[in-house]
Image: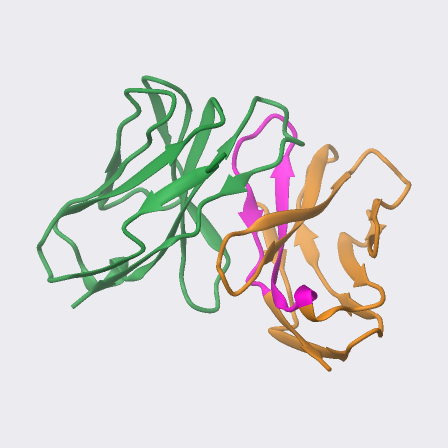
């Protein structure tokens, strides 16, 4: 059981380039999330999804887009990369609506924009 | 808006001893949930312990326990009989009842000295 899988693990982008961070989970979880973690800071929510076809903005959505065409996949798209998007990105999933439900995290994707 | 503060960027403890990590939060809500997550060097974050605000009894999971002081808005994590595998970043997190967003603190890096 792989859990939450993120690719790539590392990426260097030039300013203005675009890329997609992939996230796949095999636990049939309805809820999926994208967080970013900046040095010395806690995780901040970028976007989340409560099911296929439904997405919503988190705290820091500017510069990002998401889609949720299947239950398993929740890709994060960066358009026109900027140095401020240098961060570690985490995808997470959760089984249901219970607020006590445990979040399962991927191993993270370290992105550097130069 | 809710905030979570971890005032200890780094902590260290001798193996087999006890350490307490601090967390305070700010909210005007009465119904919420609190979590401690562990992020080992491999970077995959895992849930350590959770506490429902309506429960007066402090949560315990084996060597991990919390001291939940609702009036003081404090939620500290105690690790007993520290082991080398406990070395990690620890994040305190808050979620309002009915909300999907987890609010994270800045994290505390815990080092275990052999």
In this view, the residue in front, A5 or A81, is A5
User: Residue, x 31% and y 42% (percent of image)?
Assistant: A61
Q: Position of residue B106 (x, y in %)?
A: 55, 62
Question: Which corner quadrant holds the C terminus of chain A?
Answer: bottom left
Q: Position of residue B7 (x, y in %)?
A: 65, 69
In this view, the residue in front, B114 or B97, is B114
User: Residue, x 63% and y 24% (percent of image)?
Assistant: A98
Vertical arrangement, residue B31 with respect to residue A91, above or below = above
In this view, the residue in front, B48 or B6, is B48
Q: Which contiguous range is marked in magenta?
A: B85-107
- The chain letter corresponding to orange is B
Does the magenta-highlighted stretch encompass residue B93?
yes
Q: Position of residue B11 (x, y in %)?
A: 68, 76
Q: Is residue A77 left or right of residue B109?
A: left
Vertical arrangement, residue A16 with respect to residue B51, above or below = below
- The chain letter corresponding to green is A
Does the magenta-highlighted stretch encompass residue B78?
no
């Amino acid at each position: 059981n792989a859990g939450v899988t993120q690719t790539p693990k590392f990426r260097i982008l030039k300013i203005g380039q675009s890329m997609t961070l992939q996230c796949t989970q095999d636990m049939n979880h309805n809820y999926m999330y994208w967080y970013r973690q900046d040095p010395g800071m806690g995780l901040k929510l970028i976007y989340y999804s409560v099911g296929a076809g439904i997405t919503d903005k988190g705290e820091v959505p500017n510069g990002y887009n998401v889609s949720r065409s299947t239950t398993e996949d929740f890709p994060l798209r960066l358009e026109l990369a900027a140095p401020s998007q240098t961060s570690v990105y985490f995808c997470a999933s959760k089984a249901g609506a219970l607020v006590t439900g445990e979040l399962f995290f991927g191993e993270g994707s370290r992105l550097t924009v130069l | 808006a809710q905030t979570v503060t971890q005032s200890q960027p780094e902590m260290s403890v001798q193996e087999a001893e006890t350490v307490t990590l601090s967390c305070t939060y700010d909210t005007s809500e009465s119904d919420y949930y609190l979590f401690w997550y562990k992020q080992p060097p491999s970077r995959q974050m895992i849930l350590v312990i959770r506490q429902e605000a309506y429960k007066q009894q402090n949560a315990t999971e084996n060597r991990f326990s919390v001291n939940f002081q609702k009036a003081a808005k404090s939620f500290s994590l105690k690790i007993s009989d520290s082991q080398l595998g406990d070395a990690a970043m620890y994040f305190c997190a808050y979620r309002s009842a009915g909300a999907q967003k987890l609010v994270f603190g800045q994290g505390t890096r815990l080092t275990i000295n052999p």
